[in-house]
């Protein structure tokens, strides 16, 4: 876990760009105004630094930052979030030079939908990891439909079929605020969407996350901690320039845990223990039967072909066998 060391110094109200060793500024109040850019009228959340009560927060340490942002639905809830945590940092995140003095409402709500749907997908993955939902041929289609519903909630277009590649599903990001920013941020192809929904969802989430946290940098630093022993600490320092990057970084932590490709069917599944090799008891049972028959065949060959024939005790319906290696 990357440690985040804070330098709790006084924050000026005029400061709009801070590194990780400083708090993120929160203005005394915020309001929404209409600005015109490229002949478009855009609703923008802007700060009022002159209002009393300007403060700061340490978003890396906020336990509910991701959930609170995912709960943003409209202008009112966006204002409430901004008053608590500060601006997301449109100019800092985009480096667009568009001169907006705050966060465009449509842009902020679009990212809030992505986080909301992403949390929904993490809930589905958690159900599979815990065993509440079994991952097998029968449940894969239902899981794919549930994850696809979260994709739609996130504003993603897809999965859709390309006419030239019938099995290819393409996922596209929602458009940005201004017309010249409508180019696709990414496009991913899937040939096994309905057969491997967890693996496809994992690919989408990691692509979304990486696109937003690529601007975060890490440095090795030494930190002098003022203690009676004057202890000197060394560690990694996180450097970021927009609150939005921290939201996605904290969301990435929720995606933690190991994933593996099933040794039988090839599905990607969330592992419960480090020994998991198969996505379901049925896949494990197939491998056990295969290994059992191979041992019987070897025994027959060794005994001159007088061994038993047929299933001969092939193990079936293993109980809690998913986390055990096949024999």
Image (tube, rainbow, N blue to C red):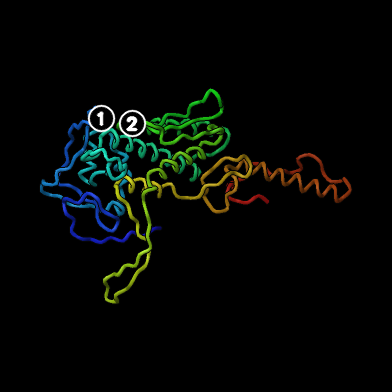
Q: Position of residue 274 (x, y in %)?
A: 55, 53
Q: Is residue 153 visible in this depiction of the protein? A: no
Q: Position of residue 273 (x, y in %)?
A: 53, 52
Residue 321 placement, left or right of 256: right
Q: Please, is residue 277 above or below residue 191 in the view?
A: below
Q: Position of residue 92 (x, y in %)?
A: 28, 45
User: Which residue: 39% across, 58% down?
Assistant: 2
Question: Distance of mark 2 from mark 1, alpha carbons?
Answer: 9 Å
Q: Give the structural element (helix, strand or loop) at label 2.
A: helix
How busy is the neighbourhood of tag 2: few (under 14 within 10 Å), some, or many (20 plus)? few
Q: On the rendered image, what quadrant is the N terminus found in?
A: bottom left
Q: Position of residue 56 (x, y in %)?
A: 20, 52
C-beta proximity under 8 Å, tags 2 and 1: yes
Residue 192: mark in rendering: none
Q: Please, is residue 174 above or below residue 223 in the view?
A: above
Q: Nearer the viewer, residue 135 or 181?
A: 181
Q: Nearer the viewer, residue 113 or 327?
A: 113
Residue 180: mark in rendering: 2
Q: Quadrant of residue 66?
A: top left
Q: Quadrant of residue 314?
A: top right
Q: Is residue 170 visible in this depiction of the protein? A: yes
How busy is the neighbourhood of tag 1: few (under 14 within 10 Å), some, or many (20 plus)? few
User: Which residue: 20% across, 48% down?
Assistant: 26
Q: Nearer the viewer, residue 167 or 199?
A: 167
Residue 96 placement, left or right of 147: left
Q: Nearer the viewer, residue 62 or 324?
A: 62
Residue 45 placement, left or right of 292: left
Q: Give the structural element (helix, strand or loop) at label 1.
A: loop
Which residue is under mark 1?
38
Q: Mark 2 vs mark 1: which is more N-terminal?
A: 1
């Amino acid at each position: 876990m990357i440690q985040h060391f804070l330098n709790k110094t006084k924050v000026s109200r005029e400061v709009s760009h801070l590194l990780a060793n400083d708090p993120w500024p929160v203005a005394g109040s915020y309001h929404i105004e209409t600005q015109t850019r490229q002949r478009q009228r855009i609703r923008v959340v802007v700060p009022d630094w002159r209002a009393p009560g300007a403060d700061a927060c340490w978003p890396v340490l906020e336990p509910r930052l991701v959930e609170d942002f995912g709960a943003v639905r409209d202008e009112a809830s966006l204002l409430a979030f901004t008053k608590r945590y500060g601006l997301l940092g449109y100019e800092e995140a985009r480096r667009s030079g568009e001169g907006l003095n705050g966060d465009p409402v449509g842009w902020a709500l679009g990212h809030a939908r992505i986080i909301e749907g992403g949390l929904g997908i993490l809930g589905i993955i958690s159900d599979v990891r815990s065993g509440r939902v079994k991952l097998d041929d029968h449940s894969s289609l239902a899981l794919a439909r549930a994850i696809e519903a979260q994709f739609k909630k996130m504003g993603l277009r897809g999965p859709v079929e390309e006419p030239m590649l019938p099995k290819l599903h393409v996922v596209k990001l929602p458009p940005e605020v201004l017309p010249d920013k409508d180019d696709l941020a990414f496009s991913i192809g899937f040939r096994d969407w309905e057969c491997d929904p967890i693996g496809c969802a994992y690919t989408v989430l990691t692509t979304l996350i990486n696109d937003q946290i690529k601007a975060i940098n890490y440095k090795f630093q030494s930190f002098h901690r003022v203690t009676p022993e004057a202890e000197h600490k060394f560690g990694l320092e996180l450097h970021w320039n927009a609150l939005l990057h921290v939201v996605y970084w904290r969301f990435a932590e929720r995606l933690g845990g190991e994933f593996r490709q099933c040794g039988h069917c090839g599905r990607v599944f969330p592992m419960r223990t480090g020994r998991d090799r198969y996505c379901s008891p049925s896949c494990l049972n197939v491998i056990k039967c295969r290994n059992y028959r191979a041992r019987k065949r070897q025994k027959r060959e060794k005994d001159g072909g007088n061994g038993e024939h047929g299933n001969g005790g092939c193990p079936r319906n293993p109980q809690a066998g998913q986390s055990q290696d096949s024999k």
